[in-house]
Amino acid sequence: MTFDNLTGQLFWPTPLKDWRIEEHGFQPEAVIKNGNKFLTANGYMGYRGTLEENGAAELAAVNLSGVYDQRGTAWREPVNAPNPFHVVTRVAGQVLDPLQHPISDHEQVLDMAAAVHHRRTTFSTGNTLVTITANRFLDMAQPQFMFLEYIVQVKQATVISVTAGIDKQIWDINGPHLVDCQSWREDSVFGYGGQTGESQLAVTTLSRILVNQGECNDIDRPDQVGQTIAVTVTPERPLCLLIAAAVTTGRETDAPIAALADTLASYTPETIGQEYNRHCQKLAALWHTSDIQIEGPQQDQVALRYNILALMMIAPLAGSQLSIPARGLSGQTYKGAVFWDTELFMTPFFLATQPAVVRDLVAYRLKGLIGAKKKAVEYGYTGAFYAWESQEDGYDATSDYNVTDVFTNRPMRTYFKDKQIHISGDVALAIWQAFQWLQDPAILSQGGAEVIVECARFYVSYATARLDRSEVAFTDVIGPDEYHERVSNNAFTNRVALATIEAALAAIAYLRENNAEYLAKIAQQWQLTDLLPLFTETAARIRLQTPNAAGVISQFDGYLALADDSIDTVRSRLLKPKEYWGGAYGVASQTQVIKQADVVMMLAVFPNDFSSDIVRANWQYYEPRTEHGSSLSYSMYGLIAAQLGMTAPAYDFFQKTAAIDLTGESKQWAGTIYIGGTHPAASGGTWRLAVEGFAGLHVENDQLVATPHLPSQWQKMAFRTYYQGHWYRVNVTAAGAVVSIADDEKIGVDD
Ligand code: IFM
């Protein structure tokens, strides 16, 4: 459909440098990395930061939140929807794609204020220049919708042909996931989709193209459904396309395809502009409560905002009861599964800035209780053993063979699923923290208390199976450091188990006092009479690792007796670059080299357990022995360093954790398995390091207090935070911090 008044520049990116991620020049080897770096998302779906001409080979994808499928015996993974923004421009039959065609200029930008992806590429073609500019956003106000403007400018009159529409070739790792796919067209709207093989869930992409000139023809080819536009473009009149698209799945029964198609059919350039404004308003409201302003190097401000936006864009939609996968909405790696990353690294950000999101994060784990109870039974325990890699309804997607041996190409038995038992406590403690932070009794009475009690029950049953008469031990486990498998009394795990049982006792005590009716109803189901003494007795006897004469806490029984080789020595023993460091024969397994913060993680989760001398002794002992092979590691070392006042290393770790998705230099392989994508735990960790580390925000006697340790590079920090029914402003300088109430804020926990 042709619109004369379509001139482009509807979603133009901000010129403000503090709000821009930008890259200039084109590097073919950075295409996949940039797909992660320039991701845009809106909680319903993520669109990888690829260029419009890219397809499955460049990992272009529309990754859906919470829709999974399994093909044969391959790993179950999230489903990608057909991509409606596949646009290819040709001049004299040549495809304008920087991977194939000479260019004179290229930029890619993420406008963080409006979550707009922008690219502009100038191609040298014949004796003229053709510039393609494209801006797109995933609508925050109407999350099933997304919009793209695509503009072709020329230096002199040039015959241009454009093919635009839905790409039928979907990037899948273990697909294809959509079967019985069909395309269709009704007036100006066309669509393509199918259904998932495993659960027959319909997934459809709909689209409509608006253009300002040219001869438009509908196409429906094996690879694409859409339109071709042929036109002689002049310097005075660029070719402009606007694509309005929507994705729908069988879950949205209240938004049938016909209704979405009607909305798409009704759009004009003006109403799309209005929709963009609504999207920006929605995002501005999120920024209002979530932004952190600093006075310091611009690159730090930009990096901080980048990580905050990364979390805002992937927060589950209100009421979806979904959570956040370890790779966010950037694709299918890590099976789109939810790990402890959400509870320990991301939840603190949402509690403080968008408390309503926490309701869905908690609801997701409540739904997972059935699966967690089943898993406990499968392993011979009672209570709730949560999935290490959780998909929908708490299904544990972890394979028994999560790593492939690079020498034999055989799957290696790993024990993440069976032995990383701290996951149950991570879930329980996050729910307990949410209850305390939000002061919302419904969190406990609507299922939260049950989860906490069942997780505590699991620890009791795990421990009693190996009960030493005097001490409760947790043998044969894996702590956060995954390189050392099947160890005993991992310091973090035992401490988490104790805190879980204590939280269960506290939750029961709270219910007894405040909701006796509910407690009476479930007392029998929980077998409270038997359970309470068991909880008290177990909690009193859990063996905690204690500091030795030098103040060092052993990561697990026998850890300090392992070979104390340096990381470089251990690395020098690798025979292949992608060799796995852990497991039975890994180069790190029989040494003190660890993958990620473990004892230091415990110190971050339980900050009041030890004196600062002990905390410092452990930071100093473990840091040189930590490979930081997980994106979860830098932030926790930075957080503890900041709290200790070691601001120089804290700042160094801030820069490292904040840059993980900006540089794309994190680990991309586990054995022969690709694990690339975005790292929201590092983003949450970045926020925690800034807020809990540099600003020193914490709770003392139910009051928010800030004891700052700003790095010398920062002069000021200012941000908002929610706590127990109030909004606060926190202003930090090197001299101190002021935490003041700001109840003029309109956005509350239920918005
Ligand atoms: O949850 C983490 C784990 O701690 C280390 N490996 C990667 C997982 C997902 O981020």
Image (cartoon, rainbow, N blue to C red):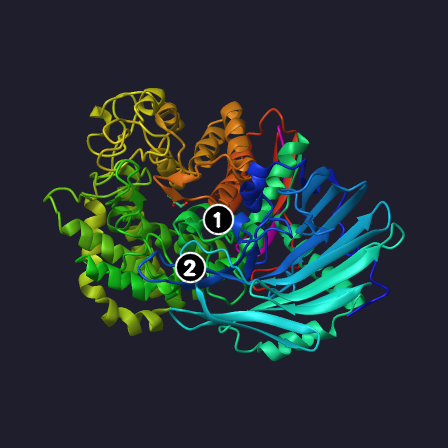
Callout 2 amino acid: Gly
Name the main secondary structure of what is drawn in magenta: strand
Percent across and percent down for residue 132 are: 74, 48
**C-alpha separation, residue under disc 2 versus residue under disc 1:** 29 Å
Residue at image mark 1: 346
Apparent side of residue 241 relative to residue 705 in the rendered image (left or right): right
Mark 2 or mark 1, earlier in chain: 2
Residue occupied by mark 2:
175
Side (left or right) of 170 relative to 293? left
Q: Position of residue 431 (x, y in %)?
A: 40, 56
Which numbered dot is residue 651? none
Decide if residue 363 is in sight here: no
For residue 528, which quarter of the picture? bottom left
Q: Position of residue 16 (x, y in %)?
A: 75, 41
Q: Position of residue 419 (x, y in %)?
A: 24, 47
Residue 261 visible in this rendered orientation of the protein: yes
The residue positioned 12% from the left and 42% from the top of the image is 470
Horizontally, residue 79 falls left or right of residue 713, namely left
> Magenta stretch?
723-734
